[in-house]
Image (cartoon, rainbow, N blue to C red):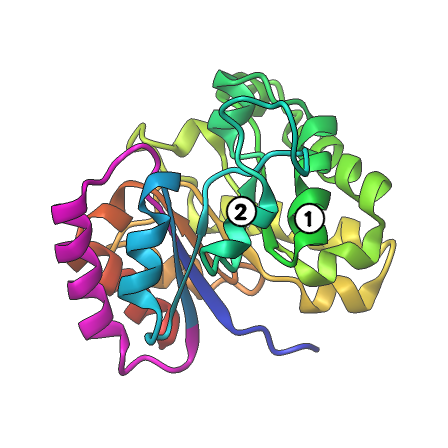
C-alpha cells in the first residue's frame, strides 16, 4: 500500500487584498514552518500571484491558481494561460471547481482540456469532482462523479493522474454549513479510488484525493483520519489564519 502524505490546499475564491494577504500569509508561514509531515498550498486570485510568490518563495508553502485557460496563447481576451502561471512559480492550478462548472458553464470536456493544458506546462492540476444536492438526493452521486472523472481519463489517459491531485467536493456542503459526515465523504473517496484502480491499481494507490466540503478546524482531524481522504481543499476557512493553521496541524499529525 502506497503511503500518501497529506496535502492541505487553500482556495481563497474571489477574496483577498494586498494588506490582508500580507497578514494572512505571514501568520500561516510562521506556524507551518515547523510542520514537515504534510504539504501546504494556497490557490489565490490571479492578481495576487506576484505578491504570493514574493511572500512564499522560501517557505514550505506552495501556491497556485484557481483556474487556467484551456488555450496556450492567442486572441482569448481575459484568459490566463498555464505558461503565464508558471512565470509566477505556481505549482498547482484548480480545474473544474464546482463554481466554475455551475456558474461559468464549464462542462467535463472543457475541464479535461484545462487539466491537460495545466499539465503540459508543468503544473499539477487539482481536479475537482462532485455532485449537487438534487443529484445526491436522486441517488446518482457515483454516476455524476464517474462522468466527471472519466472525461479526464479518456482525454488525458490514466497515467496523467500520477501528476495530479483530485478533490471531491459535495457541492451541497460548500458554504452551506452542511458537511458530509466523515463516512459519507470516505464512501465517495473510496468509490473514486476503486474506479481509478480498474484502470491502474498503482495510480489509484498513489493518488492524493482531497476532501473539499466545508472542512473546518473542528472536523478536520476526523475527516483526515479516513483511509481514502488525503487532505483538504479548503474554502472559507483558508481565509482565517487560525482556522487554516489548525487544519494544517490536523493534516500534519
Q: Position of residue 229 (x, y in %)?
A: 52, 59
| Discs 1, 2 touching: Cβ within 8 Å | no
Sequence-wise first label, 1 or 2? 2
**Position of the C terminus by quadrant:** bottom left
Q: Position of residue 35 (x, y in %)?
A: 32, 79
Is 34 drawn above or below residue 123 in the view shown?
below
In reply to whether residue 127 is colored magenta, the answer given is: no
- Residue 49 seen in the figure: yes
Q: Name the side, left or right, on which 4 lies relative to 183.
A: right
> Circle 2 is placed at which residue position?
84
Crowdedness of circle 1 by 10 Å Cα count: few (<14), some, many (20+)?
many
Name the residue: 86% across, 54% down.
198
Please tell me the numbered disc located at residue 11: none
> Circle 1 is placed at which residue position?
192
Q: CA distance from mark 1 to mark 2?
A: 31 Å
Name the residue: 52% across, 62% down.
230
Q: How many numbered marks does the figure carry?
A: 2
In reply to whether residue 37 is colored magenta, the answer given is: yes
Secondary structure at badge 1 equals helix
Crowdedness of circle 2 by 10 Å Cα count: few (<14), some, many (20+)?
some
Secondary structure at badge 2 equals helix
- Residue 187 seen in the figure: no
Instruction: Find residue 3 and report its image quarter.
Output: bottom right
Q: Name the side, left or right, on which 223 lies relative to 241.
A: right
Is 101 drawn above or below residue 84 in the view shown?
above
**Magenta part of the chain:** 10-38
Q: Name the side, left or right, on which 130 lies relative to 74.
A: left
Name the residue: 73% across, 44% down.
116
Amino acid at each position: 500500500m502506497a503511503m500518501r502524505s497529506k496535502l492541505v490546499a487553500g482556495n481563497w475564491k474571489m477574496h483577498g487584498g494586498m494588506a490582508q494577504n500580507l497578514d494572512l500569509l505571514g501568520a500561516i508561514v510562521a506556524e507551518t514552518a515547523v510542520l514537515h509531515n504534510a504539504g501546504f498550498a494556497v490557490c489565490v486570485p490571479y492578481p495576487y500571484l506576484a505578491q504570493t510568490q514574493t511572500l512564499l518563495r522560501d517557505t514550505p508553502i506552495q501556491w497556485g491558481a484557481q483556474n487556467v485557460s484551456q488555450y496556450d496563447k492567442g486572441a482569448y481576451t481575459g484568459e490566463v494561460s498555464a505558461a503565464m502561471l508558471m512565470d509566477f512559480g505556481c505549482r498547482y492550478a484548480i480545474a473544474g471547481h464546482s463554481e466554475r462548472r455551475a456558474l461559468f458553464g464549464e462542462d467535463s470536456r472543457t475541464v479535461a482540456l484545462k487539466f491537460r493544458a495545466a499539465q503540459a506546462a508543468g503544473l499539477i492540476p487539482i481536479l475537482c469532482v462532485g455532485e449537487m444536492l438534487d443529484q445526491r438526493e436522486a441517488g446518482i452521486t457515483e454516476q455524476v462523479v464517474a462522468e466527471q472523472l472519466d472525461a479526464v481519463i479518456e482525454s488525458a489517459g490514466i497515467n496523467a493522474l500520477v501528476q495530479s491531485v483530485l478533490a471531491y467536493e459535495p457541492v451541497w456542503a460548500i458554504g452551506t454549513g452542511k458537511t458530509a459526515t466523515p463516512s459519507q465523504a470516505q464512501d465517495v473517496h473510496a468509490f473514486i479510488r476503486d474506479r481509478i484502480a480498474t484502470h491502474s491499481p498503482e495510480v489509484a494507490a498513489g493518488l492524493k484525493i482531497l476532501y473539499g466540503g466545508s472542512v473546518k478546524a473542528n472536523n478536520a482531524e476526523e475527516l483526515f483520519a479516513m483511509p481514502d481522504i488525503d487532505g483538504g481543499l479548503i474554502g472559507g476557512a483558508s481565509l482565517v489564519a487560525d482556522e487554516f493553521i489548525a487544519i494544517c496541524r490536523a493534516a500534519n499529525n
